[in-house]
Image (spheres, helix red, strand yellow):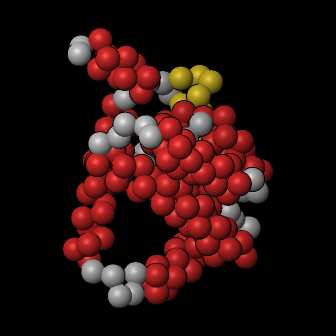
Amino acid sequence: MIETYTTDIMVSIKFYGDMKKVKRTPAGDAVTDLVLDLFRLNSLLLTAGDRLVAQLGLTSARWQILGAIIAGERPQPVAWLARGLGANRQNVQRIINELNHEGLVAFEPNPHHRRAQLVVLTDKGRQTFDAAMKLQAPWVNSLSEGLLVKDIETVHRFVTALRTKLEGDDDPREKIYRSKISH
């Protein structure tokens, strides 16, 4: 379903740009092409991740959430985890509830908020995450074979810059409106 939705978005963006001769700068065209490729890449990565960790009872989404819990300096409530992942809180809550039901995470009282419990990894959750990372290492090593580290680092810097710009844009339509009235 996500793959179909992503494909529909890609076709729509490309078709609209080609048919309507939308005025994009050369950089705008290049970023549009990059975004379309990133949609495809995201879909492929999620599928590969799902296959890689299926034997552990995980999906890419579950694995990502376990990783976010581990990466946190201290236990966090679901809303903070979701924000850090750039994900919808309700979706993260649903997955965390499933992980809790399976004994991979537990909830602890939050001294700062009665209702927003803290999410912590259980021993079983830590073992499952560690097993996933043992599967990931040879996979990512193979995937990165033949690629130059400096090229990977350049792409990482560029993607980080785009993400930073997007995180600062609450509503992209507002930016368009402001640029139109300033001209």
Horizontal relation, residue 79 to residue 55: left or right:
left
For the question of whether residue 33 can be seen, the reply is yes
Residue situated furthest right in the rendering: 101
Horizontal relation, residue 49 to residue 112: left or right:
right
Q: Residue at x 57, y 51 (%)?
A: 10
| Position in image of residue 116 (x %, y %) | 59, 28
Q: How many marks?
A: 0
In the rendered image, the quadrant that contains the C terminus is: top left
For the question of whether residue 100 can be seen, the reply is no
| Position in image of residue 182 (x %, y %) | 24, 14
Does residue 134 sit above or below 177 in this rendering?
Answer: below
Does residue 51 sit above or below 156 in this rendering?
Answer: below
Q: Residue at x 29, y 11 (%)?
A: 181
Choose between 10 and 140: the one closer to the eye.
10
Choose between 103 and 33: the one closer to the eye.
33
| Position in image of residue 78 (x %, y %) | 57, 37
Q: Residue at x 26, y 67 (%)?
A: 153
Choose between 128 and 158: the one closer to the eye.
158
Q: Residue at x 74, y 67 (%)?
A: 57
Kindly indicate the quadrant of the structure image that contains residue 147: bottom left
Kindly indicate the quadrant of the structure image that contains residue 51: bottom right
| Position in image of residue 24 (x %, y %) | 35, 40
Horizontal relation, residue 134 to residue 141: left or right:
right
